[in-house]
Image: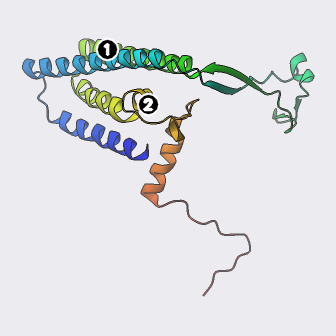
């Protein structure tokens, strides 16, 4: 996952660098950029269609438990008093650490979970296409973002999409691919910082004297 993130980031930076060299206002260049962008989006949607067919064919009935925190009731309400919520002078909500009523657990199947995940990715693809093609290109006349987004779309489908990695490239749903999927952005950012800065520096304890 971390290597895939670095490759995708490198591909994006490279695409941005190449995009800066593209001539502005050249009809031929604009045409090829537009065609390339549309082709990448159509290919992406086609791959999602193949993924949906594979998910339905596999019909995985493995139970997936999804644990989500319940929304906290507003301080001073009847629900807050019922849940034993106490608010101090700084409006900080205090709860019993042993109380497990602050989470809700829902169950689904791997099939339904994956279909919902694909649906969300397709929605994001369509929204992105409307933004880049409709606003940035047609309305504002920018072609460089289209070129960069073309490379990002290809890199995402090849390396980062969890559904593509499981159902197209045959990776097992373990680790960062285990359902329910975790938001890997924080973990990836931490790995990126560790790779750049070499990890966190040791914290000096209070009263510790500097050795000579």
Mark 1 or mark 2: whose residue is earlier in sequence? 1
User: Which is more toward the observer, 92 or 167?
Assistant: 167
Left or right relative to 165: residue 81 = right
Residue at the disc numbered 2: 166
Q: Is residue 208 above or below residue 95?
A: below
Quadrant of the image occupied by residue 200 = bottom right
Where, quadrant-wise, is the N terminus in this rendering? Answer: top left
Question: Residue 212: horizontal and vertical position, in percent?
Answer: 60, 88
Are there few (<14), some (14-19), or many (20+) residues within 10 Å of tag 1? Answer: few
Quadrant of the image occupied by residue 97 = top right
Residue at the disc numbered 1: 135
User: Which is more toward the observer, 156 or 135?
Assistant: 156
User: Which is more toward the observer, 203 or 149?
Assistant: 149
Residue at 19% in and 21% down: 36
Residue at 29% in and 29% down: 154
Left or right relative to 110: residue 53 = left
Q: Is residue 18 above or below residue 25?
A: below
Residue at 51% in and 21% down: 114
For residue 153, which numbered disc appears in the image?
Answer: none
* Element marked by disc 1: helix
Residue 141 visible here: no
Tell which tag, 1 or 2, sits nearer the viewer.
2
């Amino acid at each position: 996952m971390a290597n895939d993130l670095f490759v995708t980031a490198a591909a994006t930076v490279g695409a941005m660098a190449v995009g800066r060299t593209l001539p502005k206002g050249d009809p031929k260049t604009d045409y090829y950029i537009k065609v390339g962008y549309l082709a990448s989006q159509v290919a992406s949607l086609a791959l999602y269609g193949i993924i949906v067919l594979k998910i339905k064919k596999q019909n995985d009935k493995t139970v997936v438990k999804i644990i989500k925190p319940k929304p906290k009731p507003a301080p001073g309400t009847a629900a807050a008093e019922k849940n034993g919520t106490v608010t101090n002078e700084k409006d900080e909500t205090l709860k019993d650490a042993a109380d497990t009523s602050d989470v809700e657990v829902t169950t689904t199947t791997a099939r339904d979970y994956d279909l919902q995940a694909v649906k969300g990715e397709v929605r994001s693809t369509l929204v992105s296409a409307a933004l880049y093609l409709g606003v940035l290109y047609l309305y504002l006349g920018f072609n460089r973002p289209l070129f960069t987004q073309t490379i990002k779309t290809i890199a995402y489908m090849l390396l980062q999409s969890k559904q593509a990695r499981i159902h197209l490239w045959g990776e097992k749903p373990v680790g960062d691919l285990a359902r329910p999927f975790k938001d890997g952005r924080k973990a990836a950012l931490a790995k990126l910082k560790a790779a750049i800065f070499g990890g966190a520096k040791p914290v000096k304890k209070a009263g510790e004297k500097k050795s000579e």
